Amino acid sequence: MTVQAPVPHPHRTGAHLQAGSDALKQAAVATLAEQGVQWTDLRETVFDALAGGSSGGGAPVSAYDVADRVSAATGRRIAANSVYRILDLFVAHNLAKRVESRNAYVVNVHPSCSHDCIFLVCEDCGQIAHLDDDKLADGMRSRARTAGFTPRRPVLELMGLCSACNGAAQTGNA
Ligand SMILES: [Zn+2]
Ligand SMILES: [Zn+2]
């Protein structure tokens, strides 16, 4: 039995790559190659749709929105099933993360290292921010193990207000 455990290492924000950047795409291609998985044209189109897009990568994207973006970019329809398959592959190989509370996906800005990402989900504007805190995540995993539970994948999502929306709420009367 293998238990997936994140390798503890310091991870500064500076180590994160910009969503939609060439550097991130190159890291994603390299990560797949290391795992012996092919980078196909369709996978690239789906990756671009997830990483870029009009929203600039700040909000998670549903599989249907990815399919729409792919259709807009290529001029042909892509089946939602194909998109789901590719997104699942991306998640399995650390290229994308699922934001469970939104039933949507974001590109993983650190494809070459494994973390239990913590997502801060703004309930107002839908933007998400991303933190890594291995101490917190490992603590949760080890408490679970103590309780006789085998943790596989913590879902760490915090609902609330981003600083922009919080500022608007405090200055406005709404
Ligand atoms: Zn992370
Ligand atoms: Zn917000």
Image (tube, rainbow, N blue to C red):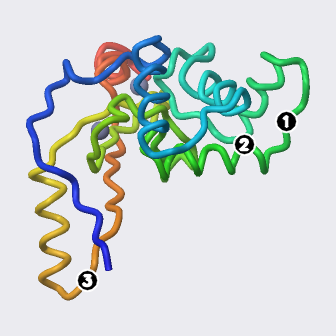
Q: Quadrant of residue 138?
A: bottom left
* Mark 2 and mark 3: Cα distance apart in space: 33 Å
Kind of residue sitting beneath label 3: Phe
In the foreground, 166 or 51: 51
Place of residue 6 in the rendered image (x, y in percent of width and height, measured from the top left)? 22, 54
Q: Is residue 168 above or below residue 145?
A: above
For the N terminus, the quadrant is: bottom left
| Mark 2 or mark 3: whose residue is earlier in sequence | 2
The residue that mark 2 highlights is 83
> Taking the image as four quarters, which one is ligand 1 found in?
top left
Place of residue 111 in the rendered image (x, y in percent of width and height, measured from the top left)? 37, 35
Q: Is residue 110 left or right of residue 56?
A: left
Q: Are marks 2 and 1 in contact (CB under 8 Å)?
A: yes
Marking on residue 78: 1
Residue at the (54%, 23%) spot, across then down: 51
Marking on residue 149: 3
Residue at the (45%, 46%) spot, across then down: 35
| Mark 1 or mark 3: whose residue is earlier in sequence | 1
Name the secondary structure under disc 3: loop
Tag nearer the camera, 2 or 3: 2
| Mark 2 or mark 1: whose residue is earlier in sequence | 1
Residue at the (85%, 43%) spot, across then down: 79
